[in-house]
Amino acid sequence: MPLKLPYSKTVENHIVKCVRGGVSRKDMLASIAHLQDAPKSFSTLYKDYGKVIFNEQAEMIAAVGSRVYDQAVNGDTKDASTFKSQELVLRAKGGWSPTHTVNEVEQEVDPDLDESASSTLMSLLGYNNDGPEDETTCTCENDNCRCS
């Protein structure tokens, strides 16, 4: 049974620096190889330092996200390049995309022309809901009903 590597604050500090710098996990693992007690595989890296990696990434995204949110709510008083760099971080590391926004547009609809989906479907199936109700007849046989 292989010996468990001791936890290294030097390795942790290097990992934090890599996360903040946007270094890929593959390059991160390669860049710590020279450090004493550094993990040699992804499974050991995540088992021993996974919380550090994910916490640092979450803190970074939260910090940038809150700045972007504040600027959106209070107005962007800085130059546009600052906001663009924050947007880049949110896209690259936060999973944000401008295509995931929802644009709702209210349109005034004439109630006489507005038709529900079920009414449209019934019309397409040949059932006319506009006629008098007494013209509709239904017959049922063995729990099978048909209306005309």
Image (cartoon, helix red, strand yellow):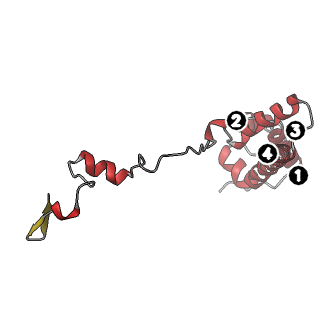
Residue occupying the point 80% across, 35% down: 31
The circle on residue 38 is 4
Name the amino acid type tagged 4: Ala
Residue labelled with disc 3: 76
Label 1 secondary element: helix
Disc on the earlier residue, 4 or 1: 1
Question: Distance from label 3 to label 1 (Cα)?
Answer: 39 Å
Lower position in the chain sequence, tag 4 or tag 2: 2
Q: Are marks 3 and 1 in contact (CB under 8 Å)?
A: no
Residue type at the position of mark 1: Lys
Q: Check the image and report above or below for 121 versus 79.
A: below
Viewer-side label of 3, 1: 3
CA distance for labels 4 and 2? 14 Å
Q: Tell me how far mark 3 sits from mark 2, CA to CA.
A: 36 Å
- Picture coordinates of residue 93, whole percent (x, y): 73, 40
In-image side of 95 versus 107 (left or right): right
Q: Which residue position holds label 2? A: 26
Of the two numbered discs 3 and 4 on the same chain, state the one appearing first in sequence.
4
Mark sitting earlier along the chain (2/1): 1
For discs 4 and 1, the disc positioned in front in the rendered view: 1
Gap between marks 2 and 1, in whole Å?
Answer: 20 Å
Within 10 Å of disc 3 (Cα), the crowding (few <14, some 14-19, many 20+) is some
> What count of labels does the image hold?
4
Indicate the quadrant containing the N terminus: top left, top right, bottom left or bottom right.
Answer: bottom right
Q: Residue 9, which numbered label?
A: 1
Nearer to us of marks 3 and 4 is: 3
Give the label, 4 or 2, closer to the camera: 2
Give the class, few, some or many, for how many residues have Cα within 10 Å of label 1's Cα (few <14, many ≥20).
few
As drawn, the residue found furthest toward the bottom would be 142
Quadrant of the rendering where the C terminus is positioned: bottom left
Name the side, left or right, on which 147 lies relative to 6. left
Compared to residue 140, the image places residue 78 above or below, namely above
